[in-house]
């Protein structure tokens, strides 16, 4: 059986606010640009079919997904 749950723009916005994420915080946690989250929420850009899995992971772990790339300013400060 194939399970597919497509997140709607409104569902994404409600989830984000319920979990106290700003668009930029959610973008950073997902490893995408802030503008991408904005476009998803406005329905300008299609939301990836797997996004619900990433959101479930963020919700259950209470933190950020491990992403490649630059560290946040906070992470760099904490290393010093």
Image (cartoon, helix red, strand yellow):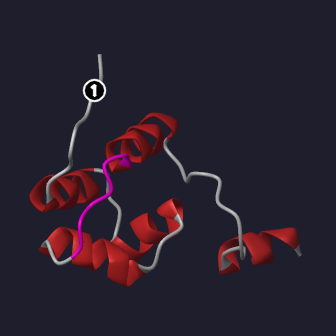
Principal secondary structure, stretch drawn in magenta: loop
Question: What is the quadrant of residue 31 in the picture?
Answer: bottom right
Examine the rendered structure and indicate whether residue 28 appears above or below residue 73.
above
The residue closer to the viewer here, 72 or 27, is: 27
The residue that appears at 35% across and 77% down in the rendered structure is: 36
Task: Give the x, y percent position of residue 56.
Answer: 38, 38
Which residue was labeled with disc 1? 3
The quadrant the C terminus occupies is bottom right
In the image: residue 66, left or right of residue 49:
right
Position of residue 55 in the picture relative to residue 2 (left or right) = right
Residue farthest front in this picture:
1
> Dot 1, crowdedness within 10 Å: few (<14), some or many (≥20)?
few
Q: How many marks?
A: 1
Q: Is residue 1 above or below residue 54?
A: above
Instruction: Name the residue rendered at 71%, 72% in the picture.
Output: 69
The image quadrant where one finds the N terminus is top left
Q: Please say whether residue 66 is one of the residues in the magenta stretch.
A: no
Q: Is residue 77 above or below residue 30?
A: below
Which residue occupies the foreground of this view, 76 or 45? 45
Q: Secondary structure at mark 1?
A: loop
Quadrant of the rendered image containing residue 17? bottom left
Residue 63 x, y percent position in the rendering: 53, 49
Nearer the observer, 21 or 68: 68
Q: Nearer the viewer, residue 49 or 63?
A: 49
User: Looking at the picture, how far across and down is residue 29, in whole percent?
Assistant: 51, 61
Task: Residue 53: give x, y in percent of width and height.
Answer: 39, 40
Residue 41 occupies quadrant: bottom left
Residue at screen point 45% across, 79% down: 33
Q: Residue at x 66, y 75 (%)?
A: 72
Determine the residue located farthest toward the top in the rendered image: 1
Region rendered in magenta: 45-50
């Amino acid at each position: 059986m194939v399970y597919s749950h497509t997140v709607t723009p409104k569902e994404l916005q409600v989830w984000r606010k319920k979990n106290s994420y700003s668009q930029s915080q959610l973008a950073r946690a997902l490893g995408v640009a802030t503008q991408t989250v904005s476009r998803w929420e406005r329905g300008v850009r299609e939301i990836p079919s797997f996004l619900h899995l990433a959101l479930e992971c963020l919700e259950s772990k209470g933190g950020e997904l491990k992403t490649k790339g630059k560290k946040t300013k906070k992470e760099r400060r904490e290393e010093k």
